[in-house]
Image (cartoon, grey):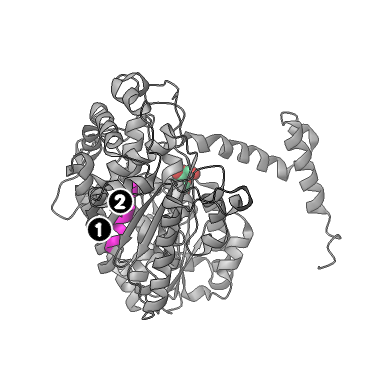
Amino acid sequence: MNPLETTQQWRDVVALKPPASLGELFATSPERVQSMTLRVGGLLIDYSKQLLDPKIIEALLNVALERDVASAFRDMADGQAINSTENRAVGHMALRSPKGQRSLMNGIDVAPEVHATLDRMATLATAVRSGDYVGATGSRIRTIVNIGIGGSDLGPSMMYEALRSLRSAEISCRFVANVDPADLAANLQGLEPAETLFIVTSKTFTTQETLSNATAAREWLVAALGQTAVDKHFVAVSSNAQAVREFGIDPRNMLAIWDWVGGRFSLPSAVGLAVMIAIGPEAFQEFLIGMHSMDAHARDSVGADNAPLMLALINIWNSTVLQSRSRVVMPYSFDLRRFPAYLQQLVMESNGKTVRKDGSLVPYATSPVVWGEPGTNAQHAFMQLLHQGTDVVPVDFIGFARSDSSDKNRQGLLFANMLAQSQALAFGQPQDTQQERHRNFSGNRPSTTIVAAELTPRVLGELIALYEHVVFFEGAMWGINSFDQWGVELGKEFATQISQNIADVDDATRHNMDASTHTLLQWFSEQQTNTSQSPLH
Ligand code: F6P
């Protein structure tokens, strides 16, 4: 395939100018909103406030056709090894395929093992929820502590918060990710060891932070209940049975994930176990149904009807053509407040790349920085820059008509605030006189609004799968591999080296270190041995 920048279709896109005034476009095209709104499952996606016109959309779709992103998607769905640098298939869609449907991964049907694992999860979740599963002393489990990081944390912790209203009152979940001892300490506070079940979630079971936290958690448990209690209080989610055994968890207490599931795509696997325990297997199944329906939509919808493809093209228009180097995601939903953090990994670990699949360097911008906070809090923090700053930062607004609260007034206020922000960004309010310039709102600042009636498990599944497929189509357009993450490796290697030197303060061991790192490490060693400084202790 020819490099993107050499194709006529891409040159046609780059030659186009964004519309000068969204206000004018809205005034002159009464059909605009209708034609730029997609309804997929429970989601309504309005991208009419993007800096697009029909010509730009057509040109972008021509690039997608030329890149043949639809066949690239089918290659993923068929289980081909599209993760070229790791020679792996990319199989997260198999995790939510309904029973009875085959899911080929490198030619092998993985559906039976996927469903066997989901069934085991459901059995465990049901037993914990009912109180039939008891700990070493015979007490029922009241708290689940998931220990994992990255994709083994961000998905389940986000989903646990998102589906707050469905959680069992009997069991709560906590999530420990950071190797900072404060994270585990804060999360163990107040817990009764006899009523605590740890889920050590790590696909590789080699992640330093997770193993170190899991070791400390095991010590905490063993100190209270003895070594034999580990069996009843530790479960692993991993693809590495040997490392699980070496850690001291019986592989019979392990739920499998597979190397064809990327960490940031792993939420619908056993990585979601803590959430399944909290909300129950039926609600979790609804979540999988939502994801699967978005998978089918992404595979079967053509051109402008394909929501993830359209959102990917919009992102590429904004970031690669109009040079916006960041994108904000603002859920107008307290329960979705961890969604921006979840998306940061999904998007940036996938598409923060400079090298294409063929080894060439990309001569254009790939993923922008993704960030965000829930509204309305964000309005009183960073929205000033979005309205009047020198950078144009596209926004994804996400909102809901109903919540579990009976307070319709405040839900209305929340929704109104979201609409107000997108309206002010798009249409602004000109103040031309020099004295009033500080009140000028230029408008023409793009946003997409995604809404649903309520944040149900199914809607959450649709929303997550939507963004997953946006990531896929972006990567396919840019020609990069969205499914590896080599960029995190060097930091891990250096962390191992430096942490070895922390234990050994001998200067000689540090001769290979740069001067800055060496000085900071020396300072750290001195501070660690100096216990007399704080007046608070
Ligand atoms: O940070 C790199 C990474 O490999 C992520 O992709 C992954 O989600 C995370 O570490 C955790 O990995 P594991 O589940 O193997 O502990």
Tell me the residue at 58%/49% (across/down).
433
Q: Is residue 231 above or below residue 444?
A: below
* 53 left or right, relative to 328: left
Question: Magenta segment range?
Answer: 458-468
Q: Main secondary structure of the magenta part?
A: helix
Kindly state the secondary structure of the residue where label 1 is placed.
helix
* 293 left or right, relative to 238: left
Look at mark 2 in the image and give the residue it sits on: 465
Tell me the residue at 50%/39% (across/down).
325
Q: Are marks 1 and 2 in contact (CB under 8 Å)?
A: yes
Is residue 173 found inside the magenta-colored segment of the image? no
Q: Is mark 2 within 8 Å of ligand 1?
A: no
Where is residue 482? Give x, y as percent: 38, 36
Residue pushed farthest front? 433
Tell me the residue at 29%/46% (across/down).
28
What amino acid is found at the position of numbered circle 2 in the picture? Answer: Ala
Q: Nearer the viewer, residue 324 or 346?
A: 324
Q: Which mark is residue 290?
A: 1
Q: Is residue 430 above or below residue 364?
A: below
What amino acid is found at the position of numbered circle 1 in the picture? Answer: Gly
Tell me the residue at 43%/61% (across/down).
420
Where is residue 479? Give x, y as percent: 35, 28
